[in-house]
Image (cartoon, rainbow, N blue to C red):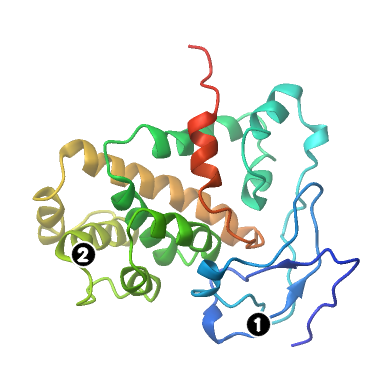
Amino acid sequence: MQAIAPQSGEVRPTIRNGVDLEDAETVWHAAQRPGIPSGPSTAAAEQHFTVAFPEGAVVSRLTYPDRQDFPKELREFLDQLPQHAAFDMLSHSQATVEIFLRQGQAQFTRLALSPRDRELTILTTASATDCAYEFTQHVPISASVGVSDAVRDAIKRKDFNAPELPGDDRAIIRFVAAVIAAPTVSDEIFSAVKERLTPREILEIMQVTGFYWSFGRVCTVLDVEVEKDHGDAVIDASRRMQVPAQ
């Protein structure tokens, strides 16, 4: 595998989605999008992923749109958010991107589900769907709400019955994995989560799972480059974002 040489100092770490990244070499992907800062992955993300392409650098299957071509209202909405490769890719669908991302905003600001259980749900969805982009972004977010390295690593390796998982965590993680794997879940798995969560929280877990499944498939199918994590920037932006008039 031949690494791509940096160009003009504008170098970004990139990860091939759906690959066992811990065993791969590090390569540098020089492709840039307008307005997106370059920089290395954070230490938290590097604990879990080695920046790499196993078969050489791969660019996204669709080009990233230029925000200057968007209607003014859409530009103003996107300007409230950190610039993410995936957000830019979603913006090809100009009529629906705000609706979709508002749903994501609600998951950081309107849920009864605890932030920690939300992050367990997102990490499990990312792992079960092999979405390195989502997992990378939620390493620091999950750490900030109390998800330990041991729990996160068990999720990453898809060991959803790992002995180091606390009982409450295991119930949620197994439920999310089962929701993704099949049209229904066993009575055993559902009973375990029902004993621990309210009906509202169970439905919220399913909605978060569905949202991040869809978001993740945009990343994996279109080869969205995995960039350095943004920490809590998305959560902070979600809390500040203007709510559309009803």
- Percent x, y of residue 7: 89, 69
Looking at the rendered structure, the secondary structure element under dot 2 is helix
Q: Picture quarter containing residue 92?
A: top right
Q: Image check: 68 left or right of 203?
A: right
Which residue is identified by label 1? 54
- Percent x, y of residue 76: 69, 27
Q: Image check: 175 left or right of 24?
A: left
In the image, what residue occupies the spot 27% across and 61% down? 173
Above or below: residue 205 compared with residue 237: below
Above or below: residue 238 compared with residue 35: above
The single residue placed furthest to the right in the displayed view is 8
- Percent x, y of residue 94: 67, 32
Above or below: residue 49 compared with residue 229: below
Above or below: residue 29 compared with residue 137: below
Looking at the rendered structure, the secondary structure element under dot 1 is loop
What's the distance in space between the residues labelled 2 and 1, CA to CA?
32 Å
In the image, what residue occupies the spot 9% across and 54% down? 191
Quadrant containing the N terminus is bottom right
In the image, what residue occupies the spot 38% across and 76% down? 157
2 and 1 marks in contact (CB < 8 Å) = no
Of residue 41 and residue 203, the one placed in the foreground of this image is: 41
- The numbered mark, 2 or 1, whose residue comes first in the sequence reads 1
Which residue is identified by label 2? 170
- Percent x, y of residue 23: 55, 87
Q: Image check: 135 left or right of 60?
A: left
In the image, what residue occupies the spot 29% across and 40% down? 204
Query: Callout 2, which amino acid?
Result: Arg
Q: Residues within 10 Å of mark 1 (few under 14, many from 20)?
A: some
Query: Callout 1, which amino acid?
Result: Pro
Q: Image check: 37 left or right of 140?
A: right
Label disc, if present, on residue 192 of the rendered structure: none
